[in-house]
Amino acid sequence: MSRIVVIAENEAGVLADIAGTLARHGINIETIGAEALAGKGAITLITDDHDGALRALTDAGFKTVSDGTLVLRLRDEPGALARLAEKFKRAGVSIQSVHFLDRRDGYATVAISADDRARAEALVEPETAV
C-alpha cells in the first residue's frame, strides 16, 4: 500500500478541491489525515487507486509525494507498537509516519512508512503483514 502526501497552501477549500478531484475520477479515499504548519498544509491519503489518484492530483496541479507504506496487524495490547518501533530503532530504520487504521478482535491494523521500506519490511514478522 502506498500513501500520497499532497503539499498545498493552507487555505479554505483545498481539502474540497482534493476530494473533488478524486471523486471526479471515481477514486475512493480509504484513509486521510491533514496537518497545517507555517502556512502550508500536508494532506496524507491512501486511496483505492494509488496510481490513478497520483495522476489525477498531479494533473490538477497539486504537489504530491508518494511512498510505500507497510500495513501491519499487531496485537492490540500495551507495548506492541513499542516493540516494533524498538526493532526499527536497533536496525537504524527511521519511522516516517504511523497511522492506526482499525482495531478489532484483539488486533490493531497500522500503516507505517519508513525511510527504508525494504529494510523495514525485512524486520516485520510474516504473521503481522496484512
Image (cartoon, grey):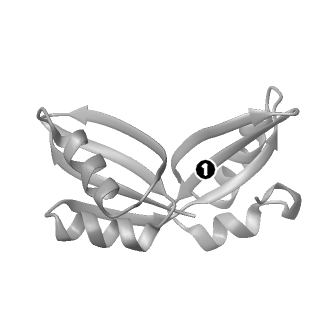
Q: In this view, does 94 lie to the left or right of 103?
A: left
Q: Nearer the viewer, residue 55 or 121?
A: 55
Q: Which of 92 and 80 is in front in this view?
A: 80
Residue 34: x percent and y percent?
Answer: 34, 37
Using the image, determine if residue 19 lies above or below residue 71: above
In the rendered image, which quarter contains the C terminus?
A: bottom right
Residue depicted at 87% across the width and 32% down the height: 106
State the residue position of label 1.
111
Few, some or many residues within 10 Å of mark 1 (<14, 14–19, 20+): many
Q: In this view, does 92 lie to the left or right of 126?
A: left
Q: In this view, does 16 lie to the left or right of 44?
A: left
Quarter holding residue 100: top right
Residue depicted at 39% across the width and 65% down the height: 66
Using the image, determine if residue 41 lies above or below residue 60: above
Quarter holding residue 23: bottom left
Asked which secondary structure carries label 1, the reply is strand
Residue depicted at 27% across the width and 62% down the height: 64
Residue depicted at 72% across the width and 53% down the height: 72
Residue 30: x percent and y percent?
Answer: 52, 49
Using the image, determine if residue 71 lies above or below residue 103: below
Q: Nearer the viewer, residue 1 or 77?
A: 1
Q: Is residue 73 left or right of residue 63?
A: right
